[in-house]
Amino acid sequence: MIDHCYDYAAAQKAQGAKIVGIMCEYTPRELIMAAGGVPVCLCGGSEEMIPAAEEVLPSNLCPLIKSTYGYSATRENPFLEMADLLVAETTCDGKKKMYELLSERHPMHVLELPQKPDEADAFDHWLKELFKLKEVLEEQFQTEITDQKLGAAIARMNAERDLKRRLAGLMKSNTPPLTGMELLDLKSIISGIPADFEQYEMALKELPGRQIDPPAKDRVRVLLTGVPLPHGAERVMGLIEDNGGLVVCQENCTGIKPLIEDVDPTAADPMRAIAEKYFHLPCSVMTKNTARMDLMRQLVQDYRPHCVVEVIWQTCLTYDLETVHVKQLVEQELNLPYLRIETDYSPSDSARIALRLQALFEMSQGSS
Ligand code: SF4
Ligand code: SF4
């Protein structure tokens, strides 16, 4: 995936396209595409980048933030090095302050997210922020983002979300034709690549009826929630599936969460329609974030997990504090076993996590 994305980005750049790094699912890729840009997700998932980051950043910081910064410190992420602009989203405090350091080497626009989505003026603030981003893209890339260009980008992203939703939907079956890890492997750090669409179509045709090994009937169905698992940081997913589990749904940002809603392609005002879709993303950086609990209820109904596993990157306070509500919902309302795993990118705790997962799966089999 990375090689393929690199070839695509390099070819696009050679033809005059601008590479735009993003680090959160709140950033509308549609706006970047409509400006002639290629949006690339730059969230770091590599443990190897952390020592270089810790020379500057505090060590007790989320590994995703450290790894992302480490790629800049080591200059080892070719996408970051070729980026014409970074869009830095004000999500958690750690990311916000890391961005200040990242901006010393990379051109950056800070996109301010609303914090209280239920307040009456939150949406207007968000819409204004998206208009500011539009202006920055137009100015820096010497282009005009017309409604027609936005319409084309909306259609492309909706088509991609539809394909990915259908692939994720295969896991609703009692006998899913792929594992959670295989589904996760189908992700890409660049959206809208036509060759990817062809591969997704092909997978949708060829996967139904396929048998996984060990078969689904011998595994415990797991709903995975919490923090995203960026490329390189899929270890917990592997541990779940190597110890008797099958991740039938990933609620997080590398799973179904950003795919749930499309941008209304018929809306008279495409900027407003884009703002609405992204405004509804239920992330823990918002207060309150009750929509995430509604999403969990729906996903449990659709994917029928036997248990819920929540992954928290160390020091991710927003997700960690939200575990109180998630645990309560899962155990008391949905009557499912729940396990919280706090970890980082180092494999040093893998054996301990495996033991806890085995105990969870035994309990889940007993109660299912
Ligand atoms: S989990 Fe929240 S902060 Fe992280 S990418 Fe998703 S929306 Fe952005
Ligand atoms: S996982 Fe948590 S701490 Fe890390 S970048 Fe995302 S919101 Fe911030």
Image (cartoon, helix red, strand yellow):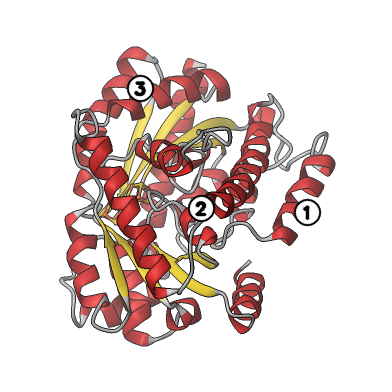
Disc 1/disc 2 C-alpha distance (Å): 20 Å
Disc 3/disc 1 C-alpha distance (Å): 37 Å
Figure quadrant of the N terminus: bottom right
Return the residue nearer the eye: 75 or 177. 75
Residue under the image location 59 percent in, 74 percent down? 9
Camera-near label (3 vs 1) is: 1
Residue under the image location 19 percent in, 41 percent down? 115
- The residue identified by callout 3 is 330
Q: Position of residue 185 (x, y in %)?
A: 61, 55
Residue 343 visible: no
* Residue type, numbered disc 2: Glu
Report whether 266 appears left or right of 358: right
Residue under the image location 83 percent in, 41 percent down? 205
Q: Which mark is residue 198?
A: 1
* Residue type, numbered disc 1: Glu
Return the residue nearer the eye: 141 or 7. 141
Q: Quadrant of residue 45?
A: bottom left
Camera-near label (1 vs 2) is: 2
Q: Quadrant of residue 334?
A: top left
* Residue type, numbered disc 3: Val
Q: Is residue 277 above or below residue 27?
A: above
Q: Which mark is residue 30?
A: 2
Q: Which mark is residue 5?
A: none
Q: Position of residue 214 (x, y in %)?
A: 70, 40
Q: Is residue 282 above or below residue 150?
A: above
Return the residue nearer the eye: 290 or 13. 13
Q: Under tag 2, what secondary structure?
A: helix
